[in-house]
Amino acid sequence: MTDRKTRLATVWLDGCSGCHMSLLDTDERLIEVAKRVDVVWGPLVDHKEFPADVDVTLVEGAISSVADLDRIKVVRARTGILVSLGDCAVTGNVPALRNRFGAGAVLRRAYLENETLDAQIPRQVVPELLPMARPVHEVVPVDVFVPGCPPSADLIFSVLSDLLEGKRPTPAAIFG
Amino acid sequence: MTKAPVRIKTLTIDGREVGAREDQTILDVARENHIFIPTLCDLPGLTAVGACRLCLVEVRGVNRLLPACVTAVAEGMEVSVSSERIDRYRRSILELLFAERNHVCSVCVTNGHCDLQSLALKLGMTHVHFPYQYPRLPVDASHERFVVDHNRCILCTRCVRVCDEIEGAHTWDVMSRGVDCRVITDLAEPWGKSESCTGCGKCVQVCPTGALSEKGKSVAEMSKRRQFLPYLTLMREARR
Ligand code: SF4
Ligand code: SF4
Ligand code: SF4
Ligand code: FES
């Protein structure tokens, strides 16, 4: 292997951003990680297009909308190792709570029942919800699973360290 | 009348020679010898029923896997409690339990105290390979002090057995088959309307998951107290 830095991306789909917060909670250890990676994509990156030839992508969140679905397909195609980070990505978790009631019930609750002024369900700008929120691996193949809501900073750090050393981690971690 | 003397059988578990009384199961002997076999429906003090299949083991000369909790020991039996095949089956069983109801550990009353959740960790379940079913299931909070949440029930029937065998009320039972199978109180009436329930709470304490909980417990607050069971069983045996 060359000394080329690992091209790392993180993607935020239907999650609360808690997994990204937990990643930041690795604190000063991030400096070590930063020396060895190029962060080529993340929630704060401004480009429109997900870059090509990404070595490792961490995905937070379930696949809940048409936009999530389109995004994850591109991400999968352009990523070497895809990591489901956290319970929403691994199990569907809280976003999937709605699956028993259907997307229509969620939209009615959010946009009609709880709205007094000019209540209407948006048809533009907001991406269309899929009938069910699904874990990432039900939609595209996933290489590494990191459960937890959120996974602890220590766990994320150990997974990242393994990946940067070219190892394939199988983290022993509890759901929830 | 004099009792027939108890016979002793010799068998091997994972190559280790162990002795057992003839009335013991493979699980009893394994436990006595500190050999781990995962279980969910079994609880010492209650009749074994073989409901969850987590305790499957291999017995030499038998093609299918056998549940250790309801398989009696036999002379010369060669048992394996762990192998690539057994581990794979056990993980699949666990995954099916997660897929067939709605388990959302992060917002569950027993998060961190749950037998199903900790077994998933122990058996190395990384994710569920089967499609989640997302059934629409009721929560019955009609009882003054307890709640039954069918989303978390794994149909182990511990509640049924403790209520019948220890409390003597037989409030719980099982209704329907397959995916429609449910635990019920009395004749499928709301728990709060039950005339047989004494409110003892034993079912709540033996339930391995968040399906039965005490009211007022929030996320991760419901840990179970099971100390009463060996005590009551001992007292009962002493009376016989
Ligand atoms: S019952 Fe156990 S496995 Fe199911 S959601 Fe609750 S903590 Fe998780
Ligand atoms: S509280 Fe006691 S009597 Fe009532 S259902 Fe549970 S075990 Fe049976
Ligand atoms: S309610 Fe609890 S104890 Fe009863 S069958 Fe379901 S999981 Fe088992
Ligand atoms: S413990 Fe044996 S089948 Fe459940």
Image (cartoon, helix red, strand yellow):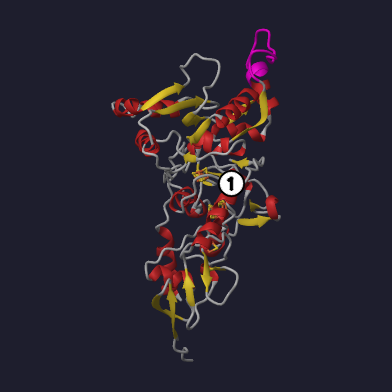
What chain is tagged by disc 1? Answer: B
Q: Position of residue B231 (x, y in %)?
A: 40, 64
Image point 58% across, 75% down: which residue?
B62
Residue depicted at x 67% and y 40%: B136
Instruction: Please tell me in which quadrant of the rendered image residue A141 appears.
Output: top right
Q: Which residues are magenta?
A: A110-127
Magenta stretch: residue A24 in it? no
Residue in the image at 34% along x and 25% along y: A34
Q: Residue furthest top?
A: A117
Q: Is mark 1 within 8 Å of ligand 1?
A: no
Q: Is residue A125 magenta?
A: yes
As helix, strand or loop, the secondary structure at mark 1 comes to: loop
Nearer to me, B102 or A138 = A138
Residue A114 placement, left or right of A146? right
* Amino acid beneath label 1: His
Q: Position of residue B147 (x, y in %)?
A: 55, 43
